[in-house]
Amino acid sequence: MKVDADMGISTKAIHAGETPDSITGASAPNLVMSTTFVVDEPLSFSANNMKDDMPYLYTRWGNPTVRQLEAKLAALEGADACVAFASGMAASAALLLGTLSQGDNLVISDTNYAGTAEFVRETLPRMGITVSPVDTSDSANISTALTPATKLVWVETPSNPITRLADIRAAADIAHEAGARLAVDSTFATPIATRPLELGADFVVHSLTKYIGGHGDALGGAVLGEAGAMNALNIEAVIHYGGTLSPFNAWLIMRGAATLPLRMRAHQDNAIAMANFLEKHPRVERVLYPGLASHPQHELAARQMHNFSGMMALRVKDGAAVARRMMRELRVFHYAVSLGHHRSLIYWMATDDLLSSSFRLSGPQREAYERYAGDGVFRISVGLEDAADLCTDLDRVLS
Ligand SMILES: *Cc1c(COP(=O)(O)O)cnc(C)c1O
């Protein structure tokens, strides 16, 4: 069905990108696993000569099932175009390498997904790209860090693992005034909570492995933005770096995405119930959840997020010891990394470990992180089980 831009997000989540099969009438999307396609007209062998209306040639260039997912995601984000990747990291690396060249500078949140943090600190400098990690929860830090060489500003909001937010509209204005573009890793928010392109961002990045797929059974990633830029990214990154999304994963993620609006409401409801329970718990030192009035940026969260999502960070006394107990004693939660699944997940993130291996912060930036996280936080991805069972599960290991 061709969805209209003014249709609601639940209708888009279900129908965008999907049409009944024209031959069989199949209502659900076909899973096209073919890697190659029979051609009945002369086609160039070079991706550089690829045209929008070209028939399918080879799945690394484009695949009907992957295209359907891309169309659905573009409709959800209100984007011109979407390019899907084999993972969130494939999407992030593609956007960074595809937009930055030797001599350019990147300004980026100083706390974010560990893979992104390590990639920008290790790989980009080797390519002659300078990187300036700053605390982007204060937009003034972005202004201060910008140089004439800055081509890209990258914020993750809410950021992993401490749910620190960045003001997207302010960051976009600051970046554009300096001739740079803004990319937002919106994995924690999803298009249900925040649509960064509507707030002025140039690119949105998602790990589809998380909320959008939603069931913990398929890796995937996506970049969304203006059609010309996405076409260039498709040629350079999907076709030439080769981090192509498997059609099978696209099919699974599409099925997950159809219920994203419904799931995000339930994630938020459970997260609010848990955050309120934990905030009153005698063993709890701090709960960081954008939906709580006690969150340092609750006012920005209320303005920028239409849904507070299901991610929170929890500080307790003797966190490292509690973590060991959790591994043995949790019954409902899975003690595991990743997030955004229907199952609740929890994982201990020790500050020393993160700051020395991924974020490499010192001085005031380290102190700012420690003000949020102390010696460590539990990252909690609140799932879709009954909230009372989740609270009982944590209460038993905390008490
Ligand atoms: C998981 C995650 C990524 C990386 O995604 P993968 O699909 O695991 O490669 C990037 N950003 C954020 C915020 C994430 O949570």
Image (cartoon, rainbow, N blue to C red):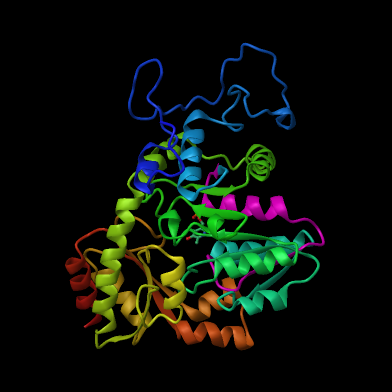
On whether residue 92 falls in the magenta region, the answer is yes
Whether residue 259 sits left or right of residue 35 in the image: it is: left
Is 11 rendered above or below residue 350?
above
Residue 39 image offset from top left, x and y in percent: 61, 15
Residue 353 image offset from top left, x and y in percent: 52, 76
On whether residue 395 falls in the magenta region, the answer is no
Q: Specify whether residue 383 is in view.
A: no
Q: Specify whether residue 284 is in view.
A: yes
Quadrant containing the N terminus in the rendered view: top left
The structure residue drawn at horizontal position 63% and vertical position 23%, both measured from the top left corner, is 54
Q: How many numbered marks appear?
A: 0
Taking depth in this image into account, of 83 and 193 the one nearest to the observer is 193
Is 295 rendered above or below residue 73?
below
Quadrant containing the C terminus in the rendered view: bottom left
Taking depth in this image into account, of 385 and 185 the one nearest to the observer is 185
Q: Quadrant of residue 198?
A: bottom right
The structure residue drawn at horizontal position 52% and vertical position 81%, both measured from the top left corner, is 352
Residue 102 image offset from top left, x and y in percent: 81, 58
Query: In the rendered structure, which segment of residues is drawn in magenta?
Result: 84-113
Q: Quadrant of residue 143?
A: bottom right
Whether residue 127 sits left or right of residue 343 in the image: it is: right
The structure residue drawn at horizontal position 58% and vertical position 50%, both measured from the top left corner, is 91
Residue 275 image offset from top left, x and y in percent: 29, 75
Is 116 rendered above or below residue 367?
above
Whether residue 314 sits left or right of residue 5 in the image: it is: left
Taking depth in this image into account, of 171 and 388 the one nearest to the observer is 171
Furthest-top residue in this view: 40
